[in-house]
Image (cartoon, coloured by chain):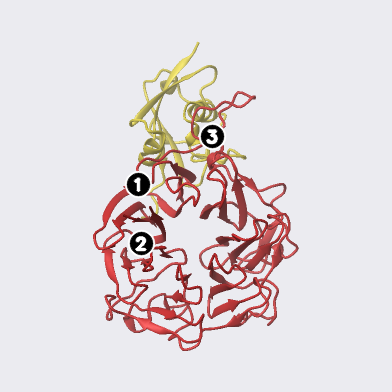
Amino acid sequence: MSKVRLLVGTRKGAFVLTSDEKRKDWKVDGPHFAGWEIYHMKGSPVDQDRLYASQTSAWFGQIIQRSDDGGKTWDTPGGGPTTSPQGMPMGESNKFVYDGVPGTHQWYDGTQHPWEFKRVWHLEPSLDDRDHVYAGVEDAALFESKDGGKSWQELSGLRKHDTGPKWQPGAGGMCLHTILLDPKDRQRIFIAISAAGAFRTDDGGKTWKPINRGLHSQYMPDPIAEVGHCVHRIAMHPSRPNTLFMQKHWDVMRSDDAGDSWREVSGNLPSDFGFPIDIHAHEPETIYVVPIKSDSEHFPPDGKLRVYRSRKGGNEWEELTKGLPQRDCYVNVLRDAMTVDSLDSCGVYFGTTGGQVYGSSDAGDTWKPIVRDLPAVLSVEAQTLP
Amino acid sequence: MAAMIRVVLPHHLRTLARVGSEVQLELNGEVTQRTILDALETKYPVLRGTMRDHVTHDRRPLVRFFVCGEDLSHQPPDAKLPDAIATAAEPVFIMGAIAGG
């Protein structure tokens, strides 16, 4: 019998939720790393018991954690007493150092500001090797580890792109939050940065191209700006890697040419502001968003928590409300806090800033809370286990 | 002659390094903030980067060092610490600043 494992990162620790394929009864394990912010956890597609977690704190910095037993036990991969030739301990697993001179990017007041590493927002394990993993960080850059997280090297072609000095932080910081690996072309990676936009590499990360044509951001002086767009999240179905769906600050967008051009598919959404976007595991044209009232009021319109589903790849949306609170609900759903499983009847899950994790075992038709009172949820990832 | 130094870590660093409330470090030579942190990171590499920057070795802004009831966080890292530290009569307290929630 298959199982589903949810990896939930919160403001105050990590939780692992497990259920059988019925997805009715859930076991909640945690908190792991109690008191620390867990921005993201994700398992390797090659070895599902190999998990990576980004543990971070404003006081004590960035820690990378790794598990080889599906989250039962964790370790810091470079934290052992390994000695370098110089005689000092290595302890490199938490070390994210920009390649060369970090340079500057645009600050909130329009001046240039030095790149400063703050935290890892997103970890994306490779499709082929459990020891190969990418990390999207704030201030925006892409790192990779090829030794299971023991050490990290920057793919600096991205940060050194000519447009780098024009990138600027969004309200949450200048974070690289989305990493999509193309299963049909191992040299192709998509990333997204708030607030720079989306980028694509076709040579394994050496060179990068902004892919923001068709994005329109209100109040930007240049209506066709190459960068500067506040992309909140991008989703890709593995069977159709040239089709991308984007939740932008405002607007839900779609590209069918690997990001070379975008068109708006917000359609009849009650608000096209939001953070997460995801795709049904078996239906590449079925997509999900959670509309949020506005960039000034980060909660659902009318106090009703509604997931919206389009079965036509956008434009035509249906509200999904069964089992979700339809009054007095003022939570938010953050960009990495929605996910799907790959069981025959696709499960959809999301976590809220109010600490609820909701699940649907029927592709969104009905919902129920899996757990109600966790700390604010930052991320949710699903693993479908044999 | 080697000195045995006592260091009290904050809760989150104790759990990270998997140690109790107080650790002991053997130190040769001068007893300073820098030599204590060097010895601490040598013994517990997972703590590298948590108290000071990986590269610059600057103290992280919300980490504080208390010695004999004094906040020495802004003292030069190579300043000699009181004899009470070198004799282990007093521990060095490393703390997270009281800020935030």
Q: Of residues A105 and B60, which is closer to you in this image?
A: A105
The color chain A is rendered in:
red
Q: Residue furthest right?
A: A162
Q: Crowding at label 1, few (<14), some or many (≥20) Cα neighbours within 10 Å?
A: some
Q: Crowding at label 3, few (<14), some or many (≥20) Cα neighbours within 10 Å?
A: many
**What residue is shown with label 3?**
A91
Q: Is label 1 on the same chain as label 2?
A: yes
Kindly state the secondary structure of the residue where label 3 is placed: loop
Q: The residue marked by circle 1 belongs to what chain? A: A
The color chain B is rendered in:
yellow
B31 vs A142: above or below:
above
Of circles 1 and 2, the one toward us is 1
- Between discs 3 and 2, the one toward the N terminus: 3
Q: Which of the 4 image quarters holds residue B14?
A: top left
**What residue is shown with label 2?**
A376
Q: Residue furthest bottom?
A: A268
Q: Which mark is residue B74?
A: none
Q: Of residues A242 and A94, which is closer to you in this image?
A: A242
Residue A325 rendering spot, x and y as whole percentages: 27, 76
Type of residue at label 3? Gly
Q: Crowding at label 2, few (<14), some or many (≥20) Cα neighbours within 10 Å?
A: many
Residue A166 rendering spot, x and y as whole percentages: 69, 67
Can residue A31 be seen in this snapshot? yes
Q: Is label 3 on the same chain as label 1?
A: yes
Q: Residue furthest left?
A: A25
Q: The residue marked by circle 2 belongs to what chain? A: A
Tell me the CA gap for discs 3 and 1.
21 Å
For residue A24, side relative to residue A311 (left or right): left
Residue A42 rendering spot, x and y as whole percentages: 46, 53
Q: Of residues B31 and A352, which is closer to you in this image?
A: A352
Q: Of residues A207 and A345, which is closer to you in this image?
A: A345
